[in-house]
Amino acid sequence: MAIVSRGFHGRPRPQAGRLPPGQYETYDFPVLSAGPTPRIEQDAWEFTVTTEAGERHRWSWADLMGLPAERPTVDLHCVTKWSKFDTTWQGVSVDLLLEDVETAADYALVHSYGGYTTNLPLEDLLDGKAWIAYGYDGDDLHPEHGGPARLLVPHLYLWKSAKWVRGIQLLLDDEPGFWESAGYHDYGDPWREQRYQGD
Ligand SMILES: Nc1nc2c(c(=O)[nH]1)N[C@H]1C(S)=C(S)[C@@H](COP(=O)(O)O)O[C@H]1N2
Ligand SMILES: [Mo]
């Protein structure tokens, strides 16, 4: 039990240790999209995992809804320097989607409806670190924020959390995605401030 009196010490720095270097806290939820918002009906939605051998695994919207959901509460960190704490999501762990996929791949290239891509090591999608999220703040995920479903990988800068996600391509060799090809960091760890190539 810590013996701390707020009255004596003054207001604690509320989020000390929680804000990565160079970030500020925001309370709204900015929308950042490189192009127009694609509208994908749930009936037309599908998610695929393609292995390096060309094997294709597919989930319909009904398949996704049939999988057990998790409700992660996470902090978001955007490379444009805003961070948002305690966002609440609903989605399926990527672990569940990859558990029956046979692969020797070390990398993933994530594809979105609309053409956006982003890359990350496969291990950053595993062990409870990433979700296919379709709910936000107790509601359906709004199209502007990636609905019907987006990747959520909150330990990396938010550009890795591909909105309108449509699939994961498993690769033996790393391949840069949209922003990574345009000078952004290949990995994007906010705690190491990996914003741009060379950081
Ligand atoms: N498909 C797609 N996903 C995307 C983007 C995009 O332009 N297209 N922008 C990325 C960037 S740079 C950020 S910061 C976040 C923003 O998510 P938000 O609009 O929900 O805040 O989405 C990421 N995912
Ligand atoms: Mo971003």
Image: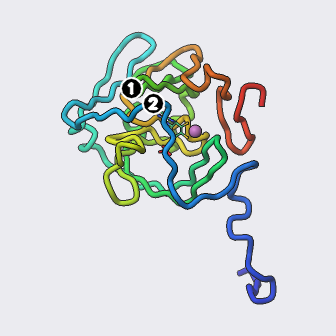
Drawn side of residue 77 relative to residue 161, left or right: right
- Residue at image point 38% right, 11% down: 54
Q: Is residue 62 visible?
A: yes
Image disc number at residue 114: 1
How far is the residue under mark 2 from the one under mark 1?
8 Å
| Among the 4 quarters of the image, the one containing residue 57 | top left
User: How far from the left and from the top, in percent, is residue 105?
Assistant: 52, 19
Residue of label 2 = 35
Q: Is residue 99 visible?
A: no
Q: Residue furthest bottom?
A: 7
User: How far from the left and from the top, in percent, is residue 34?
Assistant: 50, 31
Drawn side of residue 185 relative to residue 129, left or right: right
The answer to whether the beta carbon of the residue marked 2 is less than 8 Å from any atom of ligand 1 is yes
Amino acid at circle 1: Gly
Drawn side of residue 9 relative to residue 177, left or right: right
Q: Judge the density around disc 2: few (<14), some (14-19), many (≥20) Cα neighbours within 10 Å.
A: few
Q: For ligand 2, give the image quadrant.
A: top right
Residue 7 to residue 182: above or below = below
- Residue at image point 45% right, 30% down: 35
Amino acid at circle 2: Gly
User: Which residue is nearer to you in this view: 97 or 77?
Assistant: 77
Pointer 2 or 1: first along the chain: 2
